């Protein structure tokens, strides 16, 4: 058990969520479409997080990523639990900073949402996009780790462009929980952002294992 790794996950998740969330607040303040801003906010936020703390913890910043790493035996159960707690703490701290800089209504607008009556579409979107995300993460970190620091954030940018209209594009339970909790908008819909990413992570891992031939390119 390495406290440095947990601290790195707290800080990295904080950077990811605070940069992404503040980009949404800024877009709303400037009356710019969130779809044009949020993908880059979260994608570049992930770049910053990886560069700052990824060398310490491996740069998960997401319970779904940690779950995928656990399934692939890259992390044990105890450390996986510690990572998830750290990620939730970092994300809540990020939403608390957004609250400090603005107000609770602004924090609520950074939460993931989907249209009424579209729960099935939202959860399917989260499953699909998280599966793609985990397939990329597990593959690139094994076969070409030198490319991970840009391949993974670029995938997250793509995920946001594809998913925002359908589910709000979370693929990260900690990122969804924090603004819902701090913004006072926590309700049963949060289950979409727990179940979808975790199921998607398992599917992404299964596809990765089916395709992996055991070789390492880099």
Image (tube, helix red, strand yellow):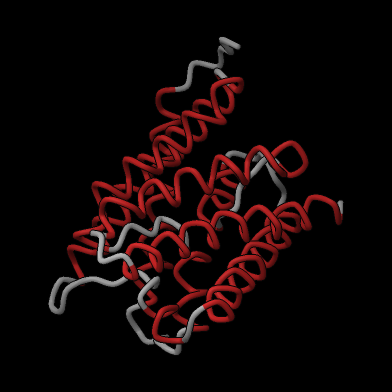
Going by the picture, which residue comes out furthest to the front?
Answer: 30
Q: Is residue 9 left or right of residue 148?
A: right
Q: Is residue 110 left or right of residue 67?
A: left
Which residue is painted at 37% across and 42% down in the image?
Answer: 157
* Image coordinates for residue 101, horizontal then vertical, percent: 55, 77
Which residue is painted at 40% across and 43% down in the image?
Answer: 156
Residue 69 seen in the figure: yes
Which residue is painted at 64% across and 72% down in the image?
Answer: 93
Which residue is painted at 26% across and 47% down in the image?
Answer: 161
Residue 1 seen in the figure: no
Pick the front one: 76 or 151? 151
Q: Is residue 142 shown above or below 50?
A: above
* Image coordinates for residue 184, horizontal then vertical, percent: 45, 89
* Image coordinates for residue 123, horizontal then vertical, percent: 27, 63
Q: Is residue 10 shown above or below 215?
A: below
* Image coordinates for residue 164, horizontal then vertical, percent: 26, 57
Q: Is residue 186 shown above or below 113?
A: below
Query: Quadrant of residue 119 in the image?
Result: bottom left
Q: Is residue 66 left or right of residue 162?
A: right
Pick the front one: 116 or 213? 116
The quarter in which the C terminus is drawn is: top right
Query: Quadrant of residue 86 in the image?
Result: bottom right
């Amino acid at each position: 058990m390495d406290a440095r790794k947990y601290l790195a996950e707290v800080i990295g998740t904080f950077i990811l969520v605070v940069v992404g969330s503040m980009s949404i607040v800024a877009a709303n303040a400037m009356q710019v479409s969130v779809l044009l801003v949020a993908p880059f906010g979260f994608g570049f936020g992930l770049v910053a997080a990886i560069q700052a703390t990824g060398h310490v913890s491996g740069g998960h910043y997401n319970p779904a990523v940690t779950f995928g790493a656990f399934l692939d035996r890259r992390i044990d159960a105890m450390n996986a639990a510690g990572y998830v707690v750290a990620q939730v703490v970092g994300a809540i701290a990020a939403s608390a900073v957004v609250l400090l800089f603005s107000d609770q209504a602004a924090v609520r607008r950074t939460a993931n949402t989907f249209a009424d009556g579209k729960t099935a579409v939202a959860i399917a979107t989260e499953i699909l996009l998280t599966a793609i995300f985990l397939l990329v993460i597990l593959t690139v970190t094994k076969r070409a780790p030198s490319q991970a620091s840009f391949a993974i954030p670029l995938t997250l940018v793509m995920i946001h462009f594809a998913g925002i209209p359908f589910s709000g594009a979370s693929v990260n339970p900690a990122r969804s929980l924090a603004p819902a909790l701090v913004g006072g908008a926590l309700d049963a819909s949060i289950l979409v952002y727990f179940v979808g990413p975790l199921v998607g992570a398992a599917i992404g891992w299964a596809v990765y294992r089916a395709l992996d031939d055991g070789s390492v390119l880099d």
